[in-house]
Image: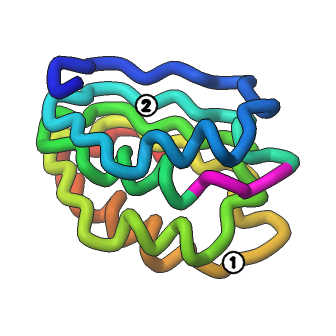
């Protein structure tokens, strides 16, 4: 619910698309940390719903880790296009765009909303 502060599902790469879709309407205005590294390394199904939920995070988001999420499709990255995270301090997108750069503009636009608070990219 709205009181969620940390979402840590890193290495959960076997979560099926149907399960990720349950996050599509989630609203987490107090979310501070997101750790989804490796979740979408082998398959991007459900990534759109996961990133839509992440985009709902309010200004309290400080950490976004999507390391090795190379299978997130361009349409899913677009869910981050309007995100505003002025307190974002850490972002890990390592290897996300190694195979395909589609969606990088939207991801980096969301990261750019951090401004001077960003310490690690």
- Number of numbered discs: 2
Residue 43 in percent (x, y) is at: 82, 52
Can you say which quadrant of the picture contains the N terminus?
Answer: top left
Residue marked by disc 2: 34
Using residue 10 as the reference point, say whether residue 107 is left or right of it.
Answer: left
Q: Secondary structure at mark 2?
A: strand
Relative to 120, is 32 above or below? above
Q: Position of residue 114 (x, y in %)?
A: 23, 53
The answer to which of 45 and 93 lies nearer the viewer is: 45
Q: Which residue is mark 1?
A: 101
Q: Nearer the viewer, mark 1 or mark 2?
A: 2
Q: Is 35 on the left-hand or right-hand side of 46? A: left
Residue shown at 18%/58% (left/top)?
84
Q: Which residues are magenta?
A: 43-47
User: Going 34% across and 38% down the picture, which residue do you hit?
Assistant: 119
The quadrant in which residue 45 appears is bottom right
Say which of 96 and 54 sits in front.
54
């Amino acid at each position: 619910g709205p009181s969620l502060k940390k979402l840590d599902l890193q290495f959960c790469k076997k979560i099926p698309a149907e399960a990720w879709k349950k996050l599509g309407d989630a609203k987490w205005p107090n979310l501070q940390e997101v750790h989804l590294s490796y979740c979408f390394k082998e398959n991007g199904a459900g990534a759109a719903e996961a990133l839509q939920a992440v985009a709902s995070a309010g200004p309290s988001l400080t950490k976004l880790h999507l390391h090795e999420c190379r299978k997130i499709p361009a349409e899913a990255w677009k869910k981050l296009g309007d995100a505003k995270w002025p307190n974002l301090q850490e972002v890990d997108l390592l290897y996300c765009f190694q195979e395909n750069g589609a969606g990088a503009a939207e991801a980096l636009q969301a990261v750019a909303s951090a401004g001077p608070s960003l310490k690690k990219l």
